Image (cartoon, rainbow, N blue to C red):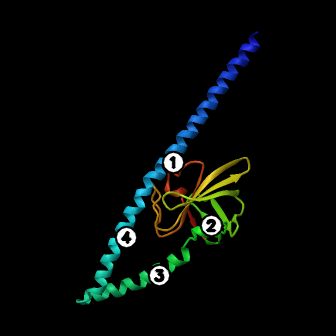
Amino acid sequence: MKIGKGINWLLILLSCLIAIVLISSLFFFFNHKKQDAEVVNTPTTEQRSTTSMTTTSTTTTSSTTSQESITTTEEERPSTQEEKTNARSQKIDEQAILNGDFSTLVGTWRNGLGQEFTFDKNGLVNSGNIEKVSMGNHGTIEFSVRSGFTGYGMSVYPAGLIIDGLDSDLSKNRLTAGQAAPTSSEQVFYKVD
């Protein structure tokens, strides 16, 4: 009789534990979606300020009335050309990725913690299989990755997109990956080769 009561308590405890895990998962899922929704407005603000800076730069370039302005204009041109070249070489082809061609991601991506992902033109080389690819609401490319019996999410942030709540180099393409949103800048992946 005591064994039967022990099994009943064990079943009740197990049921409570499963409920807690499900509720926690839903909380993290909705919290991540909330962060995604908040980020949607942020790139728009960033794009507006970039447009303003471009307009100011153009005005400075066209007004070459003093020697100082001419010097500044000449110094700005090479870096602008370098930035355009870097932007072209780093351009991520979202449409190709959505169609299963990962050529613009080929190489090794590493974060500040030493973790790495390697892509070839077909996807991830040794970190799981990409099962689903979609565009995020705020311009990211989202992957659902299956690795053994579990899985994780991966987000690609093209240069210029802000990762909400994290400092990262906006001039570079970046990745985040895991079962939860990153909490530090060290968790952001950058292409190293």
Left or right? Give the position of 73 relative to 141: left
Q: Residues within 10 Å of mark 3 (few under 14, many from 20)?
A: few
Q: How far apart are the alpha carbons under marks 2 and 3? A: 26 Å
Q: In the picture, residue 28 is in which quadrant?
A: top right
Secondary structure, mark 2, is helix
| Looking at the image, residue 179 lies above or below residue 67 | above
Q: In the picture, residue 1 is in which quadrant?
A: top right
Q: Residues within 10 Å of mark 4 (few under 14, many from 20)?
A: few
* Quarter of the image that includes the C terminus: bottom right
Left or right? Give the position of 78 relative to 146: left
Q: How far apart are the alpha carbons under marks 1 and 4? A: 27 Å
| Mark sitting earlier along the chain (4/2) | 4
Left or right? Give the position of 73 relative to 174: left
Report the mark closest to the observer, 2 or 3: 2
Pointers 2 and 3 in contact (CB under 8 A)?
Answer: no
Residue found 50% across the figure and 81% down from its top: 85
Q: How far apart are the alpha carbons under marks 3 and 4? A: 17 Å
Residue found 49% across the figure and 68% down from its top: 159
Which one is in front, 121 or 100? 100
